Image (spheres, grey):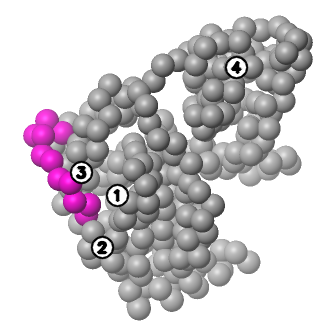
Amino acid sequence: MEEIERRQELAAFLRTRRARLSRADVGLPARSRQRTPGLRREDVAELADIGVAWYTLLEQGKDVHPSKPVLENIAQALRLTHVEEKYLFLLAGQALPVKAPAEEEEVPPELRRVVDVLTPHPAFVIGRRWDILFRNRAADLVFCFDEPFPPHSLNLLWRYFQMQGHSLDLDWEVQARTLVAHFRTDYARYPGDASFEELLHDLQHTSPLFREWWEQHDIRSVSNNGPRSIMHPALGLLEFDHVQSAFSVNLRLNIYAASPATAPKLAQALAVSST
């Protein structure tokens, strides 16, 4: 592929990946007025920690040469799959960095359909680092997943500790301790994984409780399945039976089966929000 053609292919690839994402997908608050779908260039630049003008040149197919760290940041900002990241590096004329092997974290269409059809029961899929990869509208309604908590807005563990003190969960401390012990078990499966280390670094610096419990080295291999009670600011008391099941090595499906008293509340609230 000629150099100019390769730069144009790279530019087009970046634009299409940017267009498919919403601000909610990457943990940014929605804009009140946005005429075109997808992220803006300044959104990607902010997420990738690079200059807007420089990123614009890249999307315009200009003769710029991004380094490997910059490409990695862009790949993370655009939520690229491993295959897409490899293609990005190829178009940029760079060799893909060697990383610890990990199974793809693509949520297959059949699992997405299951999550959607479970509405009004909240359901979501998490990956190996407990990032929320897909969720239904009921999960957003109950757990406010569209509310940003940067820099790890779509990470389940990060969100749980950021909401300490104003969490909706009526049994926050017990659940939080269980999550830390369960996460430590998963963490041991991926030694040297930079994404885990980054998350742990941020958690330990922002939450004294997390740091204290993490240093206790408690280990649990069983998820926190069972009854859960949530006090929602608009809907009042919500009761669920929580079940987590493994779909693959790295994908877990979380289902919050609403009680007979809770399910109608959620169905009505979702119906109102969609009108």
Along the polypeptide, which appears first: circle 4 or circle 3?
4
Q: Mark 1 points at which residue?
A: 166
263 to 219, vertically: above or below: below
Q: What element carries label 4?
A: helix
181 to 237, vertically: above or below: above
In the picture, the quarter occupied by the C terminus is bottom right
> Where are the magenta residues, as a range?
214-224
21 to 205, vertically: above or below: below
Q: Which amino acid does label 3 sit on?
A: His
Q: Position of residue 106 (x, y in %)?
A: 56, 48
Q: Position of residue 64 (x, y in %)?
A: 77, 8
Q: Which mark is nearer the camera, 4 or 3?
A: 4
Q: Name the residue under label 3.
A: 182
Between the C-alphas of marks 4 and 3, the distance is 37 Å
How many residues crowd around disc 4 within 10 Å: few (fewer than 14), some, or many (20 or more)? some
Q: Is mark 3 on a helix, strand or loop?
A: helix
Identity of the residue drawn at 41% across and 79% down: 257
Q: Which amino acid does label 1 sit on?
A: His
How many residues crowd around disc 1 within 10 Å: few (fewer than 14), some, or many (20 or more)? few
Along the polypeptide, which appears first: circle 3 or circle 2?
3
Frontmost residue, 265 versus 82:
82
The answer to whether residue 62 is left or right of residue 258 is right
Q: Are the residues at dot 3 and dot 2 in contact (C-beta closer than 8 Å)?
A: no
Q: Mark 2 points at which residue?
A: 228
In the picture, the quarter occupied by the N terminus is top right
Camera sees residue 144: no
Q: What residue type is labelled 2?
A: Arg
Q: Mark 4 points at which residue?
A: 90
Identity of the residue drawn at 79% across and 31% down: 13
Q: Are the residues at dot 1 and dot 2 in contact (C-beta closer than 8 Å)?
A: no
Along the polypeptide, which appears first: circle 3 or circle 1?
1
Q: Which mark is nearer the camera, 2 or 4?
A: 4
